[in-house]
Amino acid sequence: MDELVKLVSKKTGLSEEMSKTAVETVLKYLKQKLPAPIAGQLDTVLSGGGVADVGDLAKGLGGLLGKK
Protein backbone atom coordinates (compact mmCIF):
# COMPACT_ATOMS: atom_id res chain seq x y z
CA MET A 1 0.00 0.00 0.00
CA ASP A 2 2.95 2.31 0.59
CA GLU A 3 3.74 2.30 -3.11
CA LEU A 4 0.16 3.34 -3.92
CA VAL A 5 0.24 6.10 -1.30
CA LYS A 6 3.47 7.46 -2.76
CA LEU A 7 2.02 7.36 -6.26
CA VAL A 8 -1.11 9.25 -5.18
CA SER A 9 1.05 11.79 -3.38
CA LYS A 10 3.26 12.28 -6.42
CA LYS A 11 0.37 12.54 -8.90
CA THR A 12 -1.81 14.84 -6.79
CA GLY A 13 0.69 16.90 -4.83
CA LEU A 14 -1.00 15.85 -1.57
CA SER A 15 1.08 15.06 1.49
CA GLU A 16 1.74 11.39 2.13
CA GLU A 17 -0.54 11.56 5.18
CA MET A 18 -3.43 12.95 3.12
CA SER A 19 -2.71 10.46 0.33
CA LYS A 20 -2.81 7.59 2.81
CA THR A 21 -6.22 8.75 4.02
CA ALA A 22 -7.46 8.96 0.42
CA VAL A 23 -6.16 5.48 -0.44
CA GLU A 24 -7.66 3.96 2.72
CA THR A 25 -11.01 5.58 1.95
CA VAL A 26 -11.06 4.23 -1.61
CA LEU A 27 -9.99 0.75 -0.46
CA LYS A 28 -12.73 0.65 2.17
CA TYR A 29 -15.27 1.67 -0.48
CA LEU A 30 -14.02 -0.97 -2.93
CA LYS A 31 -14.14 -3.70 -0.29
CA GLN A 32 -17.79 -2.86 0.34
CA LYS A 33 -18.76 -2.74 -3.33
CA LEU A 34 -16.71 -5.48 -4.99
CA PRO A 35 -17.74 -9.15 -4.99
CA ALA A 36 -16.34 -11.02 -1.99
CA PRO A 37 -13.70 -13.03 -3.93
CA ILE A 38 -12.15 -9.83 -5.24
CA ALA A 39 -12.57 -7.70 -2.13
CA GLY A 40 -10.92 -10.38 -0.02
CA GLN A 41 -7.79 -10.24 -2.13
CA LEU A 42 -7.23 -6.47 -2.14
CA ASP A 43 -5.02 -6.48 0.95
CA THR A 44 -2.96 -9.38 -0.40
CA VAL A 45 -2.35 -7.66 -3.72
CA LEU A 46 -1.52 -4.32 -2.12
CA SER A 47 0.94 -5.91 0.30
CA GLY A 48 2.93 -7.28 -2.64
CA GLY A 49 1.33 -10.68 -2.87
CA GLY A 50 -0.29 -12.07 -5.96
CA VAL A 51 -3.88 -12.98 -6.61
CA ALA A 52 -4.47 -16.26 -4.80
CA ASP A 53 -6.99 -17.79 -7.17
CA VAL A 54 -7.40 -16.32 -10.62
CA GLY A 55 -10.49 -18.48 -11.18
CA ASP A 56 -12.33 -16.85 -8.28
CA LEU A 57 -11.17 -13.44 -9.44
CA ALA A 58 -12.50 -14.08 -12.95
CA LYS A 59 -15.84 -15.31 -11.57
CA GLY A 60 -16.15 -12.16 -9.48
CA LEU A 61 -15.41 -9.93 -12.43
CA GLY A 62 -17.90 -11.83 -14.55
CA GLY A 63 -20.53 -11.12 -11.93
CA LEU A 64 -19.69 -7.45 -12.11
CA LEU A 65 -20.28 -7.53 -15.83
CA GLY A 66 -23.59 -9.34 -15.55
CA LYS A 67 -22.24 -12.80 -16.39
CA LYS A 68 -22.49 -15.86 -14.17
Image (cartoon, rainbow, N blue to C red):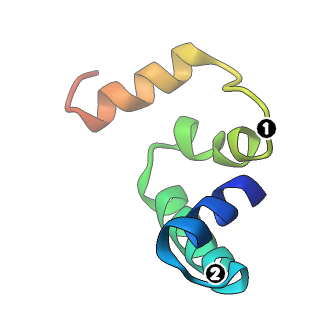
Front residue (pair 10, 29): 10
Q: Position of residue 58 (x, y in %)?
A: 44, 20
Q: Amino acid at mark 1?
A: Gly
Spot the residue most to the top.
55
Please rate how many residues cluster around mark 1, counting C-alpha atoms within 10 Å: few if below 14, some from 14 to 19, many from 20. Answer: few
In the displayed structure, would residue 42 be above or below residue 53? below
Label 1 belongs to which residue? 48
Give left or right: position of 47 versus 9: right
In the rendered image, the quadrant that contains the N terminus is bottom right
For image coordinates 64% across by 46% down, the residue present is: 42
In the displayed structure, would residue 29 be above or below residue 40? below
Q: Position of residue 16 (x, y in %)?
A: 71, 78
Q: Position of residue 27 (x, y in %)?
A: 57, 62
Give left or right: position of 66 versus 50: left
For image coordinates 69% across by 38% down, the residue present is: 45
What secondary structure is marked by label 1? loop
Please rate how many residues cluster around mark 2, counting C-alpha atoms within 10 Å: few if below 14, some from 14 to 19, many from 20. Answer: few
Give left or right: position of 28 versus 30: right
Label 2 belongs to which residue? 21
Q: Position of residue 41 (x, y in %)?
A: 66, 39
| Image quadrant in which you'd find residue 23 | bottom right
Q: CA distance from mark 2 to mark 1?
A: 20 Å
Q: Amino acid at mark 2?
A: Thr
What secondary structure is marked by label 2? helix
In the displayed structure, would residue 49 be above or below residue 10? above
Decide if residue 1 is in sight here: no
Q: Earlier in the sequence, mark 2 or mark 1?
A: 2
In the rendered image, the quadrant that contains the C terminus is top left
